[in-house]
Image: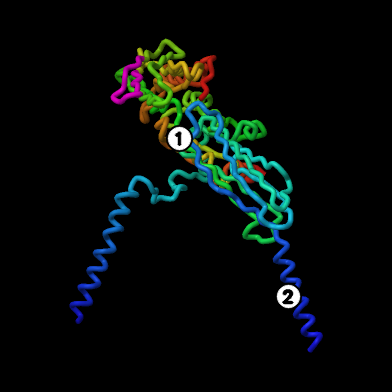
Amino acid sequence: MNTNFSRFIGVLTLVALAQSARAELKWEQTSVDLRPAFNDKQAIAHFKYENVGNTPVHFKSVHASCGCTTAQTQNEQVAPGQKGEITATFNIGGRTGTQVKTVTVQTDDPDSARSTTVLTLKAVITPLLEIQPALVYWQNGEEPKPKIITAKANKDAAIKKLNVASSTPDFTAKVEPGSAPNEFRISVQPHDTTKAVYATLTIKPDSPANPGNTFAVAARVMPPAPTSGTAITPSTKASVSTARHDLATPAPPPAESPSQ
Amino acid sequence: MKVSAVRQALLLIALAFVPAIGEAIYFRDRVSWQSPDRSSEMVNLDQAQSWGANAIWVDARPDNEFEQGHVPGAIPLNEDRWNELLPTLLAQWSLEKKIVVYCSSQSCNASREVARRLRDEAGLKEVFVLRGGWEEWLKNRR
């Protein structure tokens, strides 16, 4: 009887000790919403934590969901009562719209439910210019009517004017005000559609807040489509191959490389 | 008694329709009822390879991964440098060509995002995402 009672007390003590010696990282928030400005290169989220347990917590791994995001811890080990944060830096690059990136944090917490935490960074990116479409083209022989590219400027950027330059003289581009405020219509027209040509149109917003920011769209006249049932004579074969050669060696993008 | 039960059942069905219709209207443009991996937009390696010279391969991975290895002839187009890289692809595209976009593996999202932008922003048709990505290419090569 006494032996059984001692065992029971021993087990109870062990359970109590195991429960009292716990490591627990408490997160202030596991999801952060960001709205970076149009000229920001990065969106940075701070995920704050505190060790509310009474034993140290070690970070085993901190892993971001994509190469565009980096995550850094302040310390490898978090002492009981210690506070800190994980900083997630999302490099915006040429991304637009809603971007959701995650950082997976693994600790040595023996409780598997608490050892892995997924931190979420949500960034809504409104670019300086929203351009639609990024490509205008004409079929070979098509009437060389102008085609329209719409550029919507970010209202915070105060863009009064757009300058558009073609990399080749084969196209003319004119900028007109659009139907809505902060909107521009870029009218692009080829001079000739009998020859396959390609041009990069460099769009430069005229805004003191964004010097050097440029965007590129493309304009093309397509090569003639080979018609089925038509015998390829040496002369037609030559014209097709010439057209393809033109396209295989397009004009290089402008030296002033576009950036956002 | 029976008539009353039927009436109650019909009333409950009618009441259930009210929030359902409201939700259908409210979420019509907000929730995609289709899987993000629409089968028509995905392509297997065998099929993509069968397109031969009619396919343009687009590598959606970051620059450093592209430099370490890529599908022969692939054009780099990642979202880190979207505005810089896009013109190179548009210069090589033509109507009869299909575009095959890949990233590192089946689980990566970059190829889907690049494919979506090529369709939406550049208006290109016949843009496909390679099932299994670069990993699948490597596996097949061995």
Count of residue discs? 2
Which amino acid type corresponds to the residue marked 2 in the rendered image?
Answer: Leu
> Is residue B131 one of those drawn in magenta?
no
Q: Residue furthest left?
A: B3
Q: Nearer the viewer, mark 2 or mark 1?
A: 2
Q: Is residue A243 above or below residue B95?
A: above
> Is residue A178 one of those drawn in magenta?
yes
Residue A12 has which mark? 2
Q: Residue furthest right?
A: A3
Q: Quadrant of residue B13?
A: bottom left
Give residue A101's position: percent from left, percent from top.
Answer: 55, 42
Give residue A63's position: percent from left, percent from top.
Answer: 64, 45
Mark 2 secondary-structure assignment: helix
User: Is label 2 in contact with label 1 (beta carbons under 8 Å)?
Assistant: no
Left or right: B52 in relation to A169:
right
Give residue B131's position: percent from left, percent from top.
Answer: 53, 46
Which amino acid type corresponds to the residue marked 1 in the rendered image?
Answer: Arg
Q: Residue at x 52, y 17 (%)?
A: A252
The chain containing the residue under callout 2 comes to A
Q: Residue at x 51, y 15 (%)?
A: A254
**Boundaries of the magenta span:** A174-187
